């Protein structure tokens, strides 16, 4: 199975900060990666698929990049509603594993 | 508007069974694959199972293979997760989620339900 790691696991930031989260795959997955946001007590929401394609309705301050084994999710200017957990998911090979998550909280 | 509504969760003893349902609306159900994803309390997301739009192809995580069965009834716009031989580590919120196509790949999930809690305890 393909394993995903995320760094950091926790991130403290302030409104307006630029935030970058990294997801690494145990083997190459081309651009078959998605990112999700999950707020406490809520279902996850799709942010990005295909490593860099923004899901409809997602603010443009979110962006994704990378291919192969290393990917990044960037929030260009953190907003109050962005404090949440973020998960990557590999879409290349069944089983479609998720990363362990990164929690972004208030500094 | 796409809506996914899970039901069927609850308290069950180890070794017991449960069937989860996910009723869909707002899209042509048979045209889209569906998945179940779970989240243990305070933990991350774990993909559990997926089924193609026709129901002809199914996929399972190793942790549930042989114990959980995914199925769908396109006439009822509902996907199911039949759970047998439940263990304490199956305790989680179970989400159903929609794929963007009739096949399981691409495997990203563009709409999610609100989840149903399954608690396995003696």
Image (cartoon, coloured by chain):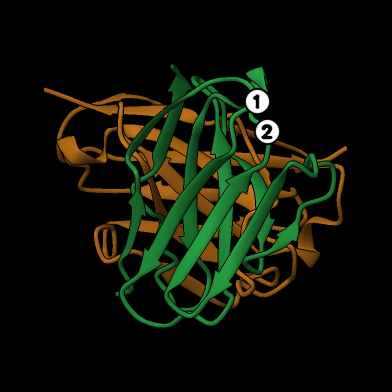
Chain colours: A green, B orange
Q: Are marks 1 and 2 in contact (CB under 8 Å)?
A: yes
Residue drawn at point x = 29 percent, y = 75 percent: A1
Location of mark 1 (residue)? A16
Disc 1 crowd rating (10 Å Cα; few below 14, some 14-19, many 20+) is few
Quadrant containing the N terminus of chain B is top right
Q: CA distance from mark 1 to mark 2?
A: 4 Å
Q: Which residue shows up at 41% across the image and 56% down it?
A: A98
Q: Earlier in the sequence, mark 1 or mark 2?
A: 1
Q: Secondary structure at mark 2?
A: loop
Spot occupied by residue A17 in the image (x, y as percentages of width and height): 59, 30
- Look at 42% across and 83% down and name the residue there: A28
- Image position, residue B49 (x, y; %): 45, 60
Horizontal side, residue A65 vs residue B75: left or right: left
Q: Position of residue B95 (x, y in %)?
A: 52, 40
Reading the image, the residue beneath label 2 is: A77
**Above or below A74: residue B54:** below
The quarter holding residue A18 reads top right
Query: In the picture shown, does residue B35 fall above or below B56?
Result: above
Residue drawn 86% across and 56% down?
B28
User: Same subunit under labels 1 and 2?
Assistant: yes
Q: Label 1 lies in what chain?
A: A
Q: Nearer the viewer, residue A105 or B44?
A: A105
Residue furthest front as drawn: A17
- Report whether residue A94 is seen: yes
| Residue A91: image location, x then y, percent | 53, 70
- Disc number at residue A52? none
- Check disc 2: other Cα within 10 Å, few if <14, some if 14-19, many if 20+: some
Q: Secondary structure at mark 1?
A: loop
């Amino acid at each position: 199975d393909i394993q995903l790691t995320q760094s950091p696991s926790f991130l403290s930031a302030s409104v307006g900060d630029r935030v970058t989260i990294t997801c690494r795959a145990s083997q190459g997955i081309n651009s078959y990666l998605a990112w999700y946001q999950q707020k406490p007590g809520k279902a996850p929401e799709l942010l990005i698929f295909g490593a860099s394609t923004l899901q409809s309705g997602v603010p443009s301050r979110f962006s994704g990049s990378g291919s192969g084994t290393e990917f990044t999710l960037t929030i260009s200017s953190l907003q109050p509603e962005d404090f949440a957990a973020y998960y990557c998911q590999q879409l290349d090979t069944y089983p479609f594993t998720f990363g362990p998550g990164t929690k972004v909280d208030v500094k | 508007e796409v809506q996914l509504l899970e039901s069927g969760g609850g308290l069950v003893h180890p070794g017991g069974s449960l069937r989860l349902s996910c009723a869909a609306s707002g899209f042509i159900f048979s045209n889209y694959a569906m998945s179940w994803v779970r989240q243990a309390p305070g933990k991350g997301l774990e993909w559990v199972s997926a089924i193609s739009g026709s129901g002809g192809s199914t996929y399972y995580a190793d942790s549930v293979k042989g114990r959980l069965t995914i199925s769908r009834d396109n006439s009822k716009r509902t996907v199911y997760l039949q759970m047998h031989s439940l263990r304490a580590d199956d305790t989680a919120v179970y989400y159903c989620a929609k794929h963007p196509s009739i096949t399981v790949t691409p495997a990203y999930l563009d709409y999610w339900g609100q989840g149903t809690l399954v608690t396995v305890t003696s």
